[in-house]
Amino acid sequence: MDVEEFRQYCLSLGDVAEKMPFGKFAARYDSILAFYAEGHMFCFIDINDFTYVDLKAEPEKVAELRQTRFSVGAPINGSLKHWVKIDFGGDVPMKEALGLVKEAYSLVAAKYRRKNTL
């Protein structure tokens, strides 16, 4: 899978927006592409270094992944409780990584869709 295929996968999940919001903080983040559901980020990649994905997850899932997989690490945004970094080419197959991205989308979309309808 390449960057464009990954991008198309994320956009196919539903009402997803994409932005490159981190360049305003530091030039080294100019290549970070983030995906949003209901206006909130659920995953991001580096389009110049497509070797990992950072994604949102429930704290229990974050802990489980860190304990059971060697290719799971700290996300670049530093939020260790709700985010994980999945290194491609490790012990998380791409199919599973895409499933985790879909879970991240569902988690964020459900949370903020409820808030937006109240």
Image: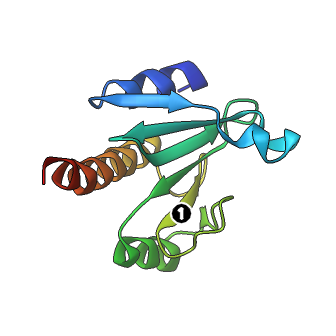
Q: Secondary structure at mark 1?
A: strand
Percent x, y of residue 36: 43, 39
Residue 109 pos. (x, y %): 27, 47
Q: Amino acid at mark 1?
A: Val
What residue sits 50% from the left and 76% below the top?
A: 81
Point out residue 83 in the picture as x, y percentages from the top left corner: 51, 64
Give the quarter of the image for residue 49. Answer: top right
In this rendering, the answer to whether 85 lies above or below 46 is below
Report the label total: 1
* In the displayed structure image, the side of residue 116 where residue 66 appears, left or right: right
**Residue at the spot of label 1:** 84
Name the side, left or right, on which 28 lies relative to 117: right
Give the left or right position of residue 73, taking residue 117 as reference: right
**Residue 29, quarter of picture:** top right
In the displayed orientation, state which residue is furthest to the left: 118
Q: Which of 72 and 113 lies nearest the eye of the viewer?
A: 113
Instruction: Give x and y (percent) for residue 96.
Output: 38, 49
- Between 54 and 21, the one nearer to me in the picture: 21
Query: Residue placed at 56% from the left, 43% from the top?
Result: 44
Look at the image and name its color scheme: rainbow
Q: Residue at x 77, y 40 (%)?
A: 24
Vertical position of residue 34 compared to residue 75: above or below = above
